[in-house]
Image (spheres, grey):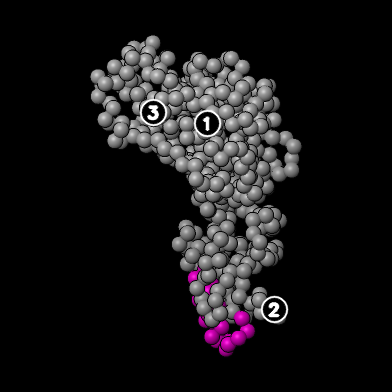
Amino acid sequence: MIYIHNKAFQLFFILGLIPQLVFSQYYRIDTTQAADWLISQFFLKDNQSGIQIKNIKYSGEKISLGYFIYKGEFNVLPSDGIILSTGNVLDSEGSHGNIASTENHSDGDSDIEMIVNNKSFDAAKIEFDFMSFSDSVSFSYVFASEEYPEYVNYGVSDAFAFLICEKDAKEKINIGTLPNSTIPITIDLINNKVNNRFFINNSHIDFAEQNYSKAEARFYYENNRLFEFDGFTVVLETGIKLNPYSLYHFKIVIADVGDQKFDSWVLLKANSFSSCGEVINPSDSELKEYFKHFTNDSINIAKNDNSISITAPIYFDFNRSGVRKDSYLLLDQLISILKYSNYAIEVNGYADKIGEIKYNQKLSQQRADNVKAYLVLNGISESRILSFGKGIFNLENNNLSRKVEFILK
């Protein structure tokens, strides 16, 4: 962003917009959080979103990753989310009076270079593995750049990509494209002249030459003051159909192209990454694949005639029926499976060998009922759940005797 044209600046004072903007609109960046925390807490829809993730890795400069918060009259950005930059994410904030052009002198990215057929620099990327419980995933984002509008079609078409592939597969699919197309979103392919219905101009150069209405001037003024970037896309949604209960690799990457000057950003809408397709009742083999990747506990899964048995370590203190906090994660994983399937579930509680048979029967029933209560509290219909106390688990090893058996039918 550079200085505001005098004609436009005078118009802003005439409209009386400056005090309103100062007190009611803002856009701020925080760079204190690490990528694994940002992805797990602010990219997933919630901890029962139908998606599980692991192996989160960030590559890039610390100043190129952050969390944004936006409050504006015109809702041109998501209200918050994760931001990646080819330079410094803080430089996307407006009113700096500077050109956002940080040269990190970092490596580029080979996938970006294949998309734009040009050399890349200063790449910032987040990668992780994930599994979806339905056959589709989606999320929302915005692309923004300081390259606009002066450097369109000058060989410096900064770009980003959202690359997905099945784990260990070679073929990558870029879903960072214009809606219902395979056109990647780069400076040259979305701007004020090409695919402009997806583009928002934030440059004084174009604004000063137009006779905008008062409403258009208000819109431009707020964006120009809040954001340093000279152009950005509307909020876009993307997604892909995939195989549920299969492990995929996801790479989010943005890079300078052609040179290291003039920064670009991609802003990921908070809590928008979700499983949104057709749900299935997972088979025993699919459940084994899931628990193999996403739990460290010893879980036994067995296929019966018309049901699947999951024997899992849900922990209780000795002679107590309350579920311990260290079992909530596994229960949340089970809840996600139930939310993205049509299974009814039977919860069978057990106690160990110590104590009288009648007492252990009562204790095991209380444990099963407390597990059921947690499932109901987290959105599973009570009509889908039966709970039974089974007394002593019929195994020699007492370490197994306080597990809970879940029967999916």
Question: As shown in the figure, which amino acid type bears the numbered disc 3?
Answer: Ser
SS under mark 2: loop
Magenta segment: 352-371
Residue on which the image places disc 2: 397
For marks 2 and 3 on the same chain, the one whose residue lies earlier in the sequence: 3
| Quadrant including the C terminus | bottom right
Q: Real-space Cα distance between discs 2 and 3?
A: 67 Å
Q: Is residue 19 left or right of residue 321?
A: left
- Mark carried by residue 95: 3
Task: Report crowding for label 1: few under 14, some 14 to 19, many 20 or more residues within 10 A (C-alpha).
Answer: many
SS under mark 3: loop
Residue 350 covered by magenta stretch: no
Task: Report crowding for label 3: few under 14, some 14 to 19, many 20 or more residues within 10 A (C-alpha).
Answer: some
Q: Image quarter for residue 126?
A: top right
Residue on which the image places disc 1: 265
Picture residue at 69% right of the left edge, 78% below the top:
397
For marks 3 and 1 on the same chain, the one whose residue lies earlier in the sequence: 3
Of circles 3 and 1, the one toward us is 3
Q: Is residue 226 left or right of residue 401?
A: left
- Mark carried by residue 202: none
Picture residue at 49% right of the left edge, 17% below the top:
149
Picture residue at 26% right of the left edge, 21% below the top:
13
- How would you classify the magenta stretch by its main secondary structure? helix
